[in-house]
Amino acid sequence: MRTPRMTDATIQAGATLAMLAWSLLARTAPAALAGMCIALLFPLSVRVCALALRWLPVAAGVRPHVEAPPPQQQHELVAGCLLVAACSLTLLIYTPPSITLAYAVALHLANLLVQFDRREGWLPNAILMPMLLCGLLAGAALGYAGSAIGGACAGWVLGGAGLFGLSITSL
């Protein structure tokens, strides 16, 4: 008997269908529409990020030519885009759809930077730590200090859990 195998394509299709089903259960029509946009953006974001990650190192002068990424990096990219989509859908519960879509775009750009840094080791900690500090200070200045600190802590915890999971699977 053949064992079913989960590929990136089946994960993308299943996650998109689950997000579309969740969107249909939203309380308001704008939230349902925004949820559908996020669900349909998910597979597109995987492809756009993959394309950007192939050409960004060449454009930045990190590498002289385009290289195909190993399969493990494609899995990480799909997981990162899925996490962004899930966070965006969660934001729809608490925030208006227009703000959530703006946050979703910002999260996708952050995911792209994280994926690029993970692959190339390009952004040094001397840049990353001041960026984190500026984000915390901006949150405090806007009156959201608790949520900014909570978000930074949650990001470190989730990032640490993800790296722990990757280290277990690579053994």
Image (cartoon, rainbow, N blue to C red):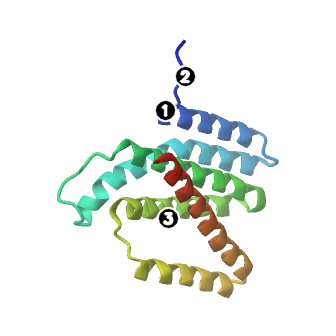
SS label for mark 2: loop
What x and y, as percent, mark residue 123?
38, 72
* Cα gap from disc 1 to disc 3, whole angstroms: 25 Å
Q: Looking at the image, which residue is at 48% across and 36% down?
A: 8
Amino acid on which the number 3 mark rests in the picture = Ala
Image-based side of 79 in relation to 141, left or right: left
Q: Residue furthest top?
A: 1
* Disc number for residue 42: none
What x and y, as percent, mark residue 52?
35, 54
What x and y, as percent, mark residue 34?
66, 50
Image-based side of 60 in relation to 4, left or right: left
Q: Nearer the viewer, mark 1 or mark 3?
A: 1
Above or below: residue 100 compared with residue 169: below
Viewer-closest of 104 and 80: 80
Q: Residues within 10 Å of mark 2 (few under 14, many from 20)?
A: few
| Label tally | 3
Label 1 or label 3, whichever comes before in sequence order: 1
Q: Looking at the image, which residue is at 61% across and 58% down?
A: 101
SS label for mark 3: helix
Above or below: residue 82 compared with residue 21: below
Give the residue pinned by disc 2: 4
Give the residue pinned by disc 3: 110
Give the residue pinned by disc 1: 7
